[in-house]
Image (tube, rainbow, N blue to C red):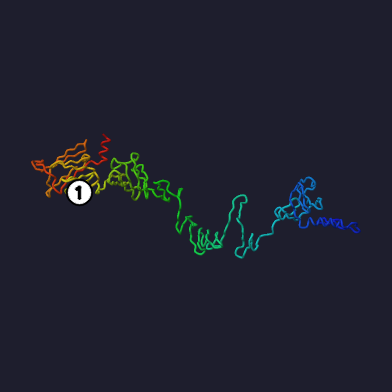
Amino acid sequence: MPDLSPRLSLPFLAPAQAQKHVTHNEALQRLDVLAQLTLEGIDQSTPPAAPQEGQVWALGDGPSGVWSGQAGSLAAFVNGAWIFIAPVIGWQATDTSDTSLKIWTGSTWEAAAGGPLDNIDGVGINASYDAFNKLVVASEASLFNHDGAGHQIKINKATMTDTASLLFQTGFSGHAEMGTSGDNAFAIKVSADGTVWNTGLSFDPVTGRARAPAGMQVTGAITGTAVTQSGMDGTAGRLMKVGDFGLGAILAPVIADIDNPNVPFGQYRTVSPTVLGTFPGFEKWGHLINFGTSQASFVQLYANIASDTLFMRRYRASDGGWKPWRSFLNTANTTVDVNGFVRAASPIVQLSDTGSVEPAEPVGATFEKVSLGQYRLHNVAPLASSGWSIEIPRDINGNRQIFVDLAYDAAQKVLDVHTSVPFWDGYWQAGAVCDIPQDRWIDLRFTPVEEEDAQTEGD
């Protein structure tokens, strides 16, 4: 019969052995160490300074001190002394540092693997699973880490009409959900009461286009290539900002060349002297509108800031490009003269026997009646040199009612008007001095201020 047991090496009592209690107590001490084995540390090399009775350490490859020469052994402190036990493959022990279960493999103490987890009814981590929620986790957070590269969380549904989604709850009442529900279009839904749901955003699975069925409210500016990059950006598919092409803006974009047919339709500013192109006059400060059917056929409107005149021209690529500027007639650039005819006006003074009237744009003239048939206008420009400049009253037969002589003092900006009774002697001549007839007037058309300034600068 052997002296030791095959598994734990417990000593047997021999027949007629003296002091049997010594052998028996040695076996009990060894059994007390190995039964429900706990380890204070694993792969230890240095003995503790003050070990406690019954404590056990698993030694590493190079132990020192009183543990020297006991590599791989179990060192137990019993009755104030160290005993060393060689572990056997398969022995189990609890690591007191983390309460994990370790198994001796013959060379190392490894963590014990759990039992098989395939086809189990459910898993509850710090909670209990149920028949519907087969996996329940109660935790501050859950980490799904990579295993060397990327990581995917997959939610699979059986058919298109089923649901594959993430549901966000408060007090186990749903208030937000994202995923595919009832079809394969990804959607984000919200609910105030967990019953009535509103789709905030959905994506077409074919085109990828997003829809916001409940509308969208954006706080802050939208930037990037989804919006226009300048006030004249005509890129298709981009969102247009307030002020683009002059729409909704207090200050419209500046156009560099009004003759450029590729400028997008819209409203623009022209700034002298940098703006290029053919203008209807010398004044290049103004406003421009382009509109039409295409860049091959459109209309351009222009209004300068110095007058109330509106101009237009056409562009037709198939007919030589730009056509001449045309001006619109309006109450600012026309007047009804003393004889009822519409005439160009810019600017006009209607001189009567008792004063003067400026029916179109302001002239700033000061009226003075010097004497019988003699009138004086102060602070006026020269009479217009192009087009008509004076219209006198006539009777129903077209005959002159007065004869007019004019004298202009450029230095004083004064125009003297002398009226008399006309008579015919081969041509109209001045007769006796007379006033302008009652309820009649003389139409005087002066040089526009901007033309006068241009002439002065040229001189």
Q: Name the residue: 78% across, 56% down.
A: 34
Is residue 388 in sight in this rendering? no
Image side of residue 413 versus residue 217, left or right: left
Q: Secondary structure at mark 1?
A: strand
- Between 409 and 296, the one nearer to me in the picture: 409
Q: Is residue 425 above or below residue 208?
A: above
The quadrant of the picture occupied by the N terminus is bottom right
Name the residue furthest right. 16
Left or right: where does residue 416 sit relative to residue 192?
Answer: left
Query: Residue 144: where, in percent of width, then height?
Result: 61, 54
- Of the pair 364 and 326, the residue shown nearer to us: 364
Q: Position of residue 440 (x, y in %)?
A: 15, 48
Q: In the rendered view, would you say 342 is above or below 36?
A: above
Residue farthest left in this picture: 425
Q: Amino acid at mark 1?
A: Val
Q: Is residue 363 left or right of residue 139?
A: left
Foreground of the two, 192 or 176: 192
Q: Position of residue 304 (x, y in %)?
A: 30, 44
* Image location of residue 388, percent across then percent down: 19, 43
Residue 14 in view in this figure? yes
Q: Which residue is mark 1?
A: 336
Q: Residue furthest bottom?
A: 131
Question: Dividing the image into 4 quarters, which one contains the C terminus?
Answer: top left
Based on the displayed image, in which of its 4 quarters is residue 454 positioned?
A: top left
- Number of other residues with Cα within 10 Å of mark 1, as a class: few under 14, some 14 to 19, many 20 or more: some
